[in-house]
Image: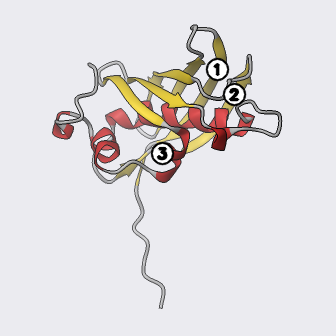
Amino acid sequence: MPIDHSNPAAYPPNIQAILKRPAPAAVLLGQELLDVDVAKGWVKVAYTVSDALANRFGALHGGMTAAMMDDVISLAAGLGVEWGQITPTLEMKVSYIRQGKLGTRLVAEANTIRRGGSVAFLEAELRDPEGALVATASSTIAITAMKRSTPQP
């Protein structure tokens, strides 16, 4: 279902949190939630490739591409968790197919391939405005309770 920003309560906790207060990294990446299917563990997100994401050659930095892939995968992974649970990345493989261009809007989709009680496997694709594949990724994530930090004296 396309994202209804006026009704955060209609979404799982991770999407509610993003709609209420985006993470600074997501803002840097130009994240825009487009669509979500909770039952399938699938999300679609757009990213605006700003100058802040450039490498020294004027293209999208590979690390920023990986950050986009980690971001979209974490969103899909988090669709099935409850408040107080998190889905940290255990490992991720990114394949770079072509460079992302500055000033473009890239679209990523992530799918949950298999989900267990404490681990899930996901895949993602990132495409340019013409639909050409920019990168793919596969990831293993943990499903765990968020640990509360204790105040330091």
C-alpha gap between disc 1 and disc 3: 22 Å
For marks 2 and 3, give the one nearer the viewer. 3
Q: Amino acid at mark 2?
A: Val
Q: Residue 24: x, y in percent?
A: 48, 52
Rendered image: mark on residue 94:
2
Determine the residue positioned at 58% across, 8% down. Answer: 130
Would residue 88 be visible to someone looking at this image?
Answer: no
Frontmost residue, 91 versus 94: 94
Would residue 101 be visible to someone looking at this image?
Answer: yes
Q: Tell me the residue that label 3 is attached to.
A: 27
In the depicted structure, whether residue 28 falls above or below residue 137: below
Q: Tell me the residue that label 1 is attached to.
A: 136
In the depicted structure, whether residue 106 falls above or below residue 142: above
Give the residue at the far right of this rendering. Answer: 57
Q: Residue 8: x, y in percent?
A: 21, 39
| Label 1 vs 3, first from the N-terminus | 3
C-alpha gap between disc 1 and disc 2: 6 Å
* Left or right relative to 12: residue 104: right
Q: Residue 71: x, y in percent?
A: 52, 37
